[in-house]
Amino acid sequence: MATTTLTPAASAYRTGLYAWLTTTDHKKIGIMYVINSFVFFFIAGLLALMVRTELVSPGLQFVTDQQYNELFSMHGTFMIFLFVIPMLAGFGNYVVPLQIGAPDMAFPRINALSFWMLPLAGVLLLLGFVTGGTAAAGWTSYAPLSEDRPLAATGYGQDLWIMALVLIGTSSILGAINFLVTIFKMRAPGMTLFRMPILVWTMLVTSVLVLMATPVITSALIMLFIDRNYGGSFFQPPNGDAILYQNIFWFYSHPAVYVMVLPAMGFVSEILPVFSRKPLFGYKAFVFATAAIGALGFSVWAHHMFTTGAVYLPFFSIMTFLIAIPTGVKMFNWIFTMWRGQLMLKTPLLFAIGFLSMFLIGGINGAFSAAVPVDFALHDTYWVVAHLHYVLFGGSVFGVMGALYYWFPKMTGRMMNETVGKAQFVLMFIGFNLTFFPMHELGLAGMPRRIADYASSTGWQDLNVVATVGGFTIAASMTLLLWNIFLSLRSGPPAGDDPWEANTLEWATSSPPPAYNFDHLPEIRSERPLFDLRHGRTAEH
Amino acid sequence: MTTDNQALLPVEHNPLASMPHDTHGGISNPVLGMILFITSEVMFFGGLFAAYFNLRANAAAWPPREFEDTLQILPFVGPATILLILSSFTCQWAVWAIRRDDRAVFLRSMTVTVILGITFLLMQATDYVVLGSEGLTLASGTFGTTYYTLTGFHGAHVFGGVVMLSVILYRGMAGQFSGRHYDAVEGASLYWHFVDVVWILLFSLLYLLPGKTPAI
Amino acid sequence: MSSSPRSRTSQTAIFALAVGAAIIGLSLVLVYFGINVLDEGADFISGLYPPIAVTTEGAQIRELYTVIFLIAVAIFIVVEGLIIWTVIRYRRKPGDDTLPPQTHGNNIAEMVWTVVPTIIVIFMFVISWQTLNVVDTASANPQTRIRALAGQFQWQFDYLSPDGTKVLYTELLPLVSLGGGMTVPAGRTVHLSLVSNDVIHAFYVPQFLFKRDVVPGHPNQFDFTVNESDAGQTFRGQCAELCGSGHSIMLFEVRALTGAEFDAWLADKVAKANATPAPPPSGGVGTTVKLSALGVKYEQTSISAPAGAPFRIEFENKDPSTPHNVAIHEGSPTGKAVFTGEVFPGVATKTYDVAALAAGPYAFVCTVHPTMTGTLTVQ
């Protein structure tokens, strides 16, 4: 195990809670991002359990139609904007400066500002629950439904939602600027762009997507706000255009799904080489594939609108199919990283393998929807719910779990419990598939999305019961996760600098790292500087 | 396996030395940050412009009959445009001045820039009052909504720019800038030029582009 | 140093045995609970397919689905198989610390797994584009024109004249079971246009394997032809775009008749619609109960009427363009119907003459919106 002895430069002059509230240290900010994201993950998960409970049998048992609409709208909103996107940004915040040998992010105070906007936005969203109802037009909030037409949402929920999302968007954009300047300008000597860890590349491409796409949804949200509150006519017929909202909304929201998955792919790309004890297969191909996904991601947005009768179908269909190619390249590169390796089947690797398998299914069922006539049958049904959860849960969440188990030792100085981790993985894997695989069949059978209730004559109940059982199984696996975190923080064995015999610079300093990260840096001659150091060699290329 | 400490290269003794001065030459961190921020703002206005073009294409007549002659270049909007363009020049003179350590010219040019910016805002506000009295509001169908949204958000960005430049002016008066230290001035001036370019585009779109009338 | 090949083979064998035993054990548990494993398995497989289509366009879509499904299964088996094989074959043996060969990549491999997926994907695009051109057509002279009007929260169907300019008959009840539904002639091309009164809805019939959004300000249309062999059947339909609190109840049904039956049915409906209405009854008819509907809800949740004497209900429908009525059922909204008033769109007022009712509790409900209910006490 590589060790570096480091003495902190000076003792901290702020302590305790005050230190955390006023910190500009990317490591503390990264941890706060992760904690905040988990809080909203559990809130959103609770909303999902309520949804699943209502759907377990025909008839409205627990909530009214309107309340049900609020439940799934807020579930989606919290998951996307306050869990996945910030969680990935949080891990990026923690790991990227360390991996490039920098002492912090380029703009530490803006980093802190970016973070604190998030709990504030979360509070705004939660306020809807106690002020007459939250937004209830789906996380997509299509106009004109979201514009307070009669019979639609009441109260200020939709306006609170708009304000919260504008805040979160601003936080994201500032974060993206920070990442880009840090990555372009603050790499340690010797770390050329093509020697950066792959995670840094994925954060780079993700940040470009955030920078270019997020402002577009900000404009859509502002236009929606003006329509709702100032008599505007952007999206209201007869002169406004309801389809305009969808175009502007999806121009952001499609690249957003790559924002939600590329960093998770970065996590997997860090974990697989370490636990296979071989380098990432096809590093350059990987970089180009990531860039291709980012670029192509801007050209497919209207595949969410195939049934509107208002888009040029062949173009968006072919571009959607084409995006499968760089994704496939990555899949094979990951598999061949493991091929002929020495796989250490520890929890981070289990989650990475789970990612590969589940994301594969998510990519495959997405191909069905790319075929326009098939999408005519599947759009707005539970098939789409299956697809999005296979890529976002089977993909991003599994990636996040892997990242947590992999970097927890670095962040806290303690190892997480392997047995509980493996148990969590198995339970989560089973629960996840039980919940979402049946949804393929439900969608094919004709069950639309976003319905609070269904008649028993449809025959949909059996599969809904299976899905609900799966949902509660996922919840059980989360209790294992919480227990593991609690247990490990209290009495996990000390991790040391480099418990995994890893490759990248964050493992060349103490766990946790001191303020400003490094006292000394290894020579950087490849994308695996620590591996090179450990084996007394410079890079092959 | 223990580490051979001789293989490690020491980081600069002061760990803060690499911030904000980076390990690579070229554009400074704050200026790169501002360029990226401006990119995001371009995309924001892009969304608003896209909405404008879409709604304009859908409309039978543009401007609609009742607002055929409402938007007028004189007496406010045209002169305000000239003032804003002038202010970009004075802003750039300020940047060139501080680069050659001429603090007097820098302060003077920056003061004029701020004054021109404020004047632009006042003229825009007065024009709004006139338009309002002629019946054009946010609620005046797609024409009014798009006009006020586009010019309003541009105005908000001008306001932000005025605040930014005022801070630069204040810091300049406090002696914080010199021929070796002027990144913030460069950044702020880039933003100001961006605001000016957006206005030129917006002005051309709203006031110079020929309208369309429905075929009878 | 590393474990011998023989012990690795035996490890794999034990692993396979364990998986097999688990599957057998699981099947035994399912059988114990009365779950017919083979039947359920067959159901599961067929559930991975969409329903058999009842339109010619839908059949094309189902064929496309089948091709994509087979490609998907093949890709899944190959890639997932590779993953599982790799994980089993290359896992580290305890005590083995040798570094595996540090392969950085292989350009030929990269080319292969870029080019082959590209070919597969382009193939899928081409066949789906071809299917689209067959499915998404609009014929110049459709034999039947219907317009579906979607609103919060119901469907109504206008039967149009052949040139599409006149409404011959409007069906206000969306379900066949209520005496309404969208009646179509099997074997003939139906041109359906879609209009929304308020927010975005979607016209979705699972057995057509087809849906199309109904967007206010953007009228949509599509053609479909129900198979002649499917005449006599009823297909369920539902709104598939979130439209508010009543989204889940926005159901409708499509009923296919033979061409001749359809012509007769439509002629009959048109005649009835054009017939002069019966003259209103003269003289007082006792008490008038006032009832009104706004926002797809009755404004009065409980009303009362005298027992043993006919009475009138003056019903004001305040929801513009939205059809409502008042129907009286014994006891609860699902009880026996004792009176069903005429359905009419708002904003309008109609007076219903209700025959004498015995004393007791009744419920009144809107035939179009089953969640619109109230209680009627007759005493």
Image: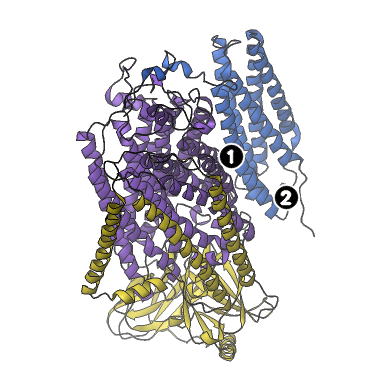
Chain colours: A purple, B blue, C yellow
Q: Is residue B58 above or below residue A523?
A: below
- Asked if badges 2 and 1 are on one and the same chain, I answer yes
Q: Is residue A338 above or below residue B9?
A: below
Of labels 2 and 1, the one closer to you? 1
Q: Which quadrant does the C terminus of chain C fall into?
A: bottom left
Q: Position of residue C2 (x, y in %)?
A: 30, 44
- Position of residue C113 in the picture relative to residue A421 (left or right): right
Q: Position of residue C233 (x, y in %)?
A: 48, 84
What residue do we see at 43% from left, 68% from top? C293
Q: Write down the residue under mark 1.
A: B44
Q: Is residue B196 above or below residue C137?
A: above
Task: Identify which amino acid the numbered label 1 is placed on.
Answer: Phe
What residue do we see at 69% from left, 26% from top? B84
Taking depth in this image into account, of A416 and A531 the one nearest to the observer is: A531
Q: Which quadrant does the N terminus of chain C fall into?
A: top left
- The circle on residue B62 is 2
Whether residue A455 appears in this view of the structure is: no
What residue do we see at 54% from left, 43% from top? A285
